[in-house]
Every structure is written in C-alpha cells, then in structure tokens.
Image (cartoon, rainbow, N blue to C red):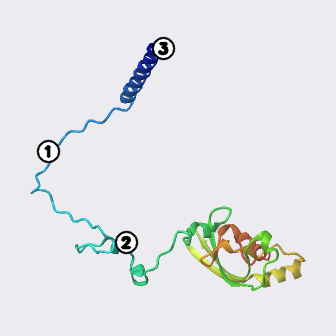
Amino acid sequence: MLSEVNKDEEAQLQWEEEVKRLQEIKNPEPVVESTPEPEESQLPEISIQTSYDEKPNTEFNSAALLETVSDAEVNSRITFEEFTDEKTLISHDAFGNKQMKIKVLEVSDEHPPMKWKFGDRVKVTKILVTIKHLATQEVEEGEFDVEEIERELQEKRHYTSTNRWIPAEDIKNGYVVGSKHTRLISDASALDYIVF
C-alpha cells in the first residue's frame, strides 16, 4: 500500500514539473542585461517627502501647475457628479445642419402631480433658444414664453402637444438636456415661431 502512495506522489511531482516546464516555454522570462551600478558619489541626491503636510524644499510645486488662475483665486473645483458634457445639452436637426441649446429662464412654482410616480419635475415657463447654423457659424437666439404659446395654440387649434414638465435631473447648469428639447418647442414649431 505504501508503494502505491509513493507512486501517486511521484506521478503528482512529475505532473507538476511538466506543468512548470510548459509554462516556462509558453511565457519565457525576459533576459535582462546587467549594467554596472554607479558609484555612490555619482548618484544625485533625492529628498523624499514623508509627510503630506510639509511643503517640498524646491521652488517647483506640482499642485500649482494643476490649478488654473480662476481655481487658484476661488479654490473651487467641479466634482465629477456636477460635471456636464456639452454634447448632452445640444440637439441637432434632421439634416445635421443646425444645433440647438435651450436655457431655462423661468419655472412655475406649481407642485407636480403624482410625484411618487414621475419623480421630481419642474414646469418650465420661459426659455431662451439658441440655434447655431453649422455651415455659416451664424447664431440665432430667441426668448419664448412657453406658457403663452401653449395657450395660443389651444385657442387657435384646440389642442396642445407641449409637455412643460421636465425632470429636475434633466436640467444641467440651467440648460435642458438635448433629449427634452422637442417637448418644449413643439407648440412654437407648430405655430411656425421656430423652424428647426
């Protein structure tokens, strides 16, 4: 019985050696040429900062390079959650010739119905629409009273398609996210106040 155990152990050792040999063949260690080490007198002196509270002895301060002038004066930075990519605030027309950006100027103080179902929403009253023509780099701006345009469309055509309730998280830095632009300009577009 002991001979069977020894045979199993030997087989296991042979197996492990074979696996190591195959791994060495598959991933050979890189050959590193040894270079002579410089003498201690040739090495430059390096000071290591052990505490973060201490300022380094040198005139060079890397933290000062990272700050812009406005950040250095105000000492305020935008956190990752507050950062908004400009592309999310812009919408394009069907042909890709124009870009639109909508800034919220005024909101209603009306409380949203069914907050539990739709979340926090804001009822937009006035907006500032900026349209940029990409071919000519011409910029047009116009202020729209969305509430007044909605009333006008109801009187003239007996319906309205505007949904002025915008989720609060879709308003970034005072601008409406591009996916919600058609909600706000649909009535103005129907009355030909805006062509986009």
**Number of numbered discs:** 3
- Answer left or right for 18 relative to 147: left
Q: Is residue 135 visible?
A: no
Disc number for residue 66:
2
Q: Residues within 10 Å of mark 3 (few under 14, many from 20)?
A: few
| Residue 101 quadrant | bottom right
Disc number for residue 36:
1
Q: Are marks 2 and 3 in contact (CB under 8 Å)?
A: no
Residue positioned most to the front: 1
Amino acid on which the number 3 mark rests in the picture: Met
**Mark 1 or 3, which is nearer the eye?**
3
The foreground one among 123 and 158 is: 123
Q: Which structural element holds mark 2?
A: helix
- Answer left or right for 177 relative to 185: left
Q: Which residue is mark 3?
A: 1
Question: Does 29 appear above or below 187?
Answer: above
Name which of mark 1 and mark 2 comes first in the sequence. Answer: 1
Disc number for residue 100:
none
**Spatial CA span between label 1 and label 3:** 57 Å
Q: Quadrant of the C terminus?
A: bottom right
Q: Are marks 1 and 3 in contact (CB under 8 Å)?
A: no
| Residue 116 quadrant | bottom right
Residue 37 point in image, percent of width and height: 14, 47
Q: Which structural element holds mark 3?
A: loop
The foreground one among 94 and 169 is: 169
